[in-house]
Image (cartoon, coloured by chain):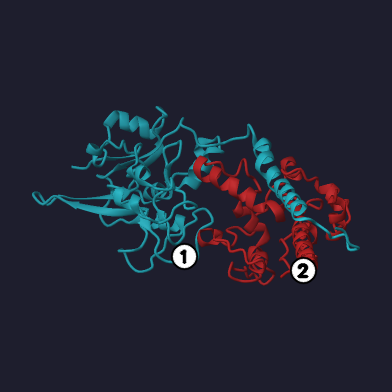
């Protein structure tokens, strides 16, 4: 029979888990995971079309809503400049200095680095190309790209100290 | 119910906080995405209907350039021979048994106005775009192959094996059905390009022109000034299996 102590411990662990996910800024620190670098910083402020924190949490949403509009309505580059899976791959899985491109089955592949660690199986690359068609490609960064769609302000985030799960939890407490 | 660690959470509090956090995480992506993109569309519309005209009298027996070009453009390569390999376009030879007259023509998805493949699809993966191009949404295709049985032109192929070297512009994969897309990546690229001289034809048409046979035209059937519409108005074009009343987007001239 579980004691009060055990159930407290369990709920504490669960809460800590949820908050650790929430405070995804600390993801790399917590796991010690090395994520392959993009071929260059697209912009000194944002590094990507969206802040890293936003991308880690929402990349699947961006890709999902976009795929249906692209396939079924034919909305491609103009509206989604910089947002397509194609463009993620072209920047984040570019050939290394030795000219080799990581394939999706390898740990060095940008997507697989996290997805194999978190055991989240993706089937995107059963059909989609896992390497860039044009390694010279650079996606444009218009004004639209500078602010996040989910309300993040990239500059503010960069100036903030990193979130600590325990401290963040304390803040949420009523 | 409190202790020195400050990690005391009741079940109700825990569930409440978790749900709120989940809501916060999901909601912005769902709603703000729509707002940010409002009024900024370059979607395919019903103003166009893409079609193709093939003059079989100009199509040379033995020439396979359209097929080769299609395979190259869309990254189709053979695995175990013609029985199972994907064919988006194939050359068909017709021989009149009475007279011995032989003619050759390319056969591809006819991009019907009333496509039987769309009617039978149980998941909605087989679909027709607003501009008349019939496609398979491989995100929802379950590989049941009903559409392959429904198609009177045998235009669709099933992918039996794991593929590796797909083209970025033409995603293809095991367990899904596929067919000619009219090189939809080129059609969509053309839409963002106002200069008509820079427009690209589908790979097969391009190759047919390059070979000098010039047996294929691609264009907008709804634009009365387009080359294809003018030619069809002047000389007409035949549908394959017109009796099925599918109103095909691909028309043929010269079939006897």
Which x, y percent locates residue B61?
25, 54
A149 lies left or right of B184 = right
Q: Is residue A42 visible?
A: no
**Counting other residues with Cα less than 10 Å from the Cα at mark 2, is it few (<14), some (14-19), or many (20 or more)?**
few
Look at the numbered disc 1 and give the secondary structure of its residue: loop
The residue that mark 2 highlights is A3
Q: Residue at x 55, y 42 (%)?
A: A69
Please tell me which residue lies in front, A41 or B223.
Answer: A41
Chain B's colour is cyan
Q: Nearer the viewer, residue B77 or B234?
A: B77
Q: How far apart, in angstroms, are the residues tagged by discs 1 and 2?
A: 54 Å
Q: Is residue B98 left or right of residue B4?
A: left
Q: Residue at x 64, y 69 (%)?
A: A99
The residue at the far front in this view is: A1
Q: Please identify which colour was used for chain A in the image.
A: red
Task: Name the image quarter holding residue B31.
Answer: top right
Residue plotted at (31% across, 43% down): B54
The vertical placement of A146 against A113, above or below, is above
């Amino acid at each position: 029979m579980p004691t009060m102590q055990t159930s407290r411990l369990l709920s504490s662990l669960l809460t800590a888990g949820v908050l650790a996910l929430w405070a995804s800024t600390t993801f790399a620190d917590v796991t010690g995971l090395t994520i392959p670098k993009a071929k260059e910083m697209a912009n000194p402020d944002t590094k990507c079309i969206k802040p890293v924190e936003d991308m880690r949490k929402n990349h699947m949403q961006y890709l999902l809503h976009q795929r249906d509009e692209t396939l079924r309505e034919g909305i491609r580059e103009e509206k989604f400049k910089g947002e397509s899976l194609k463009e993620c791959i072209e920047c984040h899985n570019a050939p290394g200095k030795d000219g080799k491109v990581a394939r999706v089955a390898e740990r060095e592949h940008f997507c697989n680095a996290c997805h194999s660690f978190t055991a989240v199986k993706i089937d995107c690359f059963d059909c989609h190309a896992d390497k860039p068609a044009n390694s010279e490609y650079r996606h444009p960064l218009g004004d639209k790209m500078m602010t996040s769609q989910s309300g993040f302000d990239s500059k503010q985030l960069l100036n903030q100290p990193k979130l600590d799960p325990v401290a963040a939890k304390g803040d949420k407490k009523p | 119910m409190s202790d020195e660690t400050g990690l005391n959470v009741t079940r109700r509090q825990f569930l409440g906080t978790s749900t709120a956090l989940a809501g916060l995480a999901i909601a912005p992506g769902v709603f703000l995405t729509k707002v940010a993109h409002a009024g900024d569309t370059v979607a395919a519309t019903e103003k166009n209907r893409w079609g193709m005209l093939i003059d079989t009298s100009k199509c040379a027996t033995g020439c396979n350039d359209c097929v080769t070009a299609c395979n190259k453009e869309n990254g189709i390569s053979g695995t175990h021979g013609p029985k199972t390999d994907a064919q988006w376009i194939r050359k068909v030879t017709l021989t009149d048994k009475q007279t011995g007259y032989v003619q050759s023509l390319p056969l591809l998805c006819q991009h019907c106005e009333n496509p039987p493949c769309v009617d039978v699809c149980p998941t909605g993966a087989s679909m027709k775009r607003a501009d008349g191009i019939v496609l398979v949404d491989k995100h929802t295709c379950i590989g049941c192959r009903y559409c392959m049985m429904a198609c009177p032109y045998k235009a669709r192929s099933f992918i039996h094996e794991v593929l590796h070297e797909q083209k970025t512009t033409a995603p293809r994969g095991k367990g899904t059905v596929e067919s000619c897309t009219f090189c939809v990546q080129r059609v969509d690229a053309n839409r963002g390009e106002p200069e008509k001289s820079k427009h690209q034809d589908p790979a097969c048409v391009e190759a047919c022109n390059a070979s000098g046979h010039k047996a294929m035209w691609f264009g907008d059937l709804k634009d009365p000034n387009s080359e294809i519409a003018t030619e069809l108005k002047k000389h007409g074009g035949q549908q394959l299996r017109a009796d099925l009343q599918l109103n095909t987007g691909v028309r043929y001239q010269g079939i006897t």
